[in-house]
Amino acid sequence: MQIYNTLTRSKQEFIPLHAPHVGMYVCGPTVYGDAHLGHARPAITFDLLYRYLTHLGYKVRYVRNITDVGHLEHDADEGEDKIQKKARLEQLEPMEVVQYYLNRYHRDMEALNVLPPSIEPHASGHIIEQIEFIKKILAAGYAYESEGSVYFDVEKYARDFHYGKLSGRNIEELYAETRELDGQQEKRHSFDFALWKKASPEHIMHWPSPWSEGFPGWHLECSTMGTKYLGEQFDIHGGGMDLMFPHHEAEIAQSCAALGHDTVKYWMHNNMITIAGKKMGKSYGNFITLEQFFTGQHPLLSKPFTPMTIRFFILMAHYRSTVDFSSEALEAAEKGLARLTEAYTRLMKLQPAATSTVDVKGLRERCEEAMADDLNSPIVISHLFDSARAVNTVFDGKATLSQADLTELQQVWKLFVEDILGLRMNAGEAASGTQEAYKGAVDLLLNMRLDAKREKNWGLSDKIRNELTALGFNIKDTKDGFEWSL
Ligand code: ZN
């Protein structure tokens, strides 16, 4: 398959370093708040890649880290630690904040049918390894100690290596963009970044090190944990485009400085989601959490949307395209997903005939081809919609399918819709609080109807059945009680 490598700015044939094993690292969340649409996109993009690589027969070790220390408010080396700030405001232990939001993140990912990674390492669980990594960078001469902190020497590194090769930035630009320091600062240049920060007295998350009681810089954890679990050279590193600079550029620099060579063969970045053309963020007032999507509790939302609608909405765009969110766009995705689900349900119930009178050949090959072309999920979806038309023709009795064609079609749909796109087709079973509540309410009404029948209250029993039927429910009495569907 071909994947777009951000490093070479071209599509390249994917050739794993150690087939059938594939090492894949994706930058995970900083867990100090609920996950939002911006978290759903990388999670779903790299879930799609993980599922597809697994389908191709690779044994994927998928590492997705959890940032629970060192991510300061301004992404640079200034401001309070994001988790510590939340802990201070909520009067909690920082690790209580981490656990609380991590549990909620996992719940949201499960709802979106994002498979769990093979390893989910925490930055705070790898302090010793990060200290050892800093020692290597210091020994190689690309870092310096200052007032108990250790900084990466970008200028010196840029003389020996290509700093900026991922993001396209160069050191001249950095000189021009950043204010010069007045000599009172710990850093030599403002673009140098912290590998280790000495903790101020009010800083509560700190560990001993050779330089000070302190904490690691944010970029360091990914160099350290990536190489710890995937080796000094591994296949794929992914993340959102917003992480390209400075985070991933710093990661390349740290790894090259410590080890003398690149660690990552293919860098992959998903594009961003905008809301009405604007970047999403708390300060823009357009920040919608996944839970708010699932419950509909946000002024920008016309109604609740299921996790599968969110997943489908994201997969309808290629991962390198921007996606602009609006309630109308989500409603369109919801309609599309309903059409696909209807065809899927019909297909699984179709009866074979002696011969096929509709041509359904080649779907598998077309879908494989689209996936192998840099994960082109929108093209896969359009092939499935074409196929849905044929399925509906057979369902309406205007065409027939032979046993062989029907079996093939059912297998291809199951493979691409459920296993690769990861769309749960038993929508009524989806782990959404709204849907659970809705199912519970219908069950409750039908149990009340059973009680009414037992009491020979035929008026009430008929009323419940007739009114639910008028709302579109199919109700069937069985010997144990009832069955219903919408
Ligand atoms: Zn990272």
Image (cartoon, helix red, strand yellow):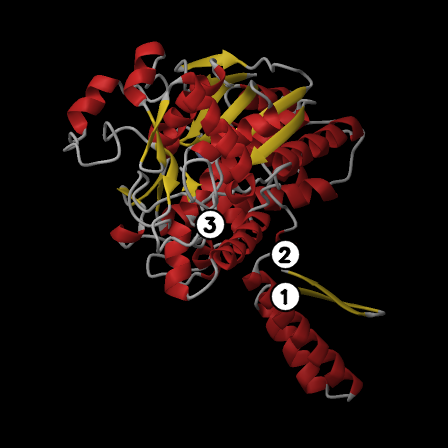
Please state if 31 lies on the left or on the right of 356 as rendered.
left
**Does residue 163 lie above or below 295 as drawn?**
above
Q: Which residue is mark 3?
A: 31
What's the amino acid at mark 2? Answer: Gly
Q: Residue at x 32, y 23 (%)?
A: 153
The answer as to whether callout 3 falls within 8 Å of ligand 1 is no
Q: CA distance from mark 3 to mark 2?
A: 30 Å
As drawn, the label of residue 428 is 2
In the image, residue 30 sits, relative to residue 315, either above or below, namely below
Looking at the image, which residue is at 61% across and 56% down?
431
Rounded to the nearest angstrom, the CA distance separating label 1 from label 3 is 32 Å
Amino acid at the residue labelled 1: Lys
Q: Earlier in the sequence, mark 2 or mark 1?
A: 2
Mark positioned earlier in the residue sequence (3 or 2): 3
Q: Which residue is mark 1?
A: 439
- Locate the C terminus by quadrant: bottom right
Q: Amino acid at mark 3?
A: Val
Residue extending furthest right?
A: 479
Compare residues 211 and 456 and report the one nearer the observer. 211
| As drawn, 338 above or below 419 | below
Q: Residue at x 67, y 32 (%)?
A: 415
Q: Quadrant of residue 75?
A: top left
Is residue 21 visible in the rendered image? The answer is yes
The numbered mark, 1 or 3, whose residue comes first in the sequence reads 3
Q: Is residue 72 left or right of residue 383?
A: left
Q: Secondary structure at mark 3?
A: loop
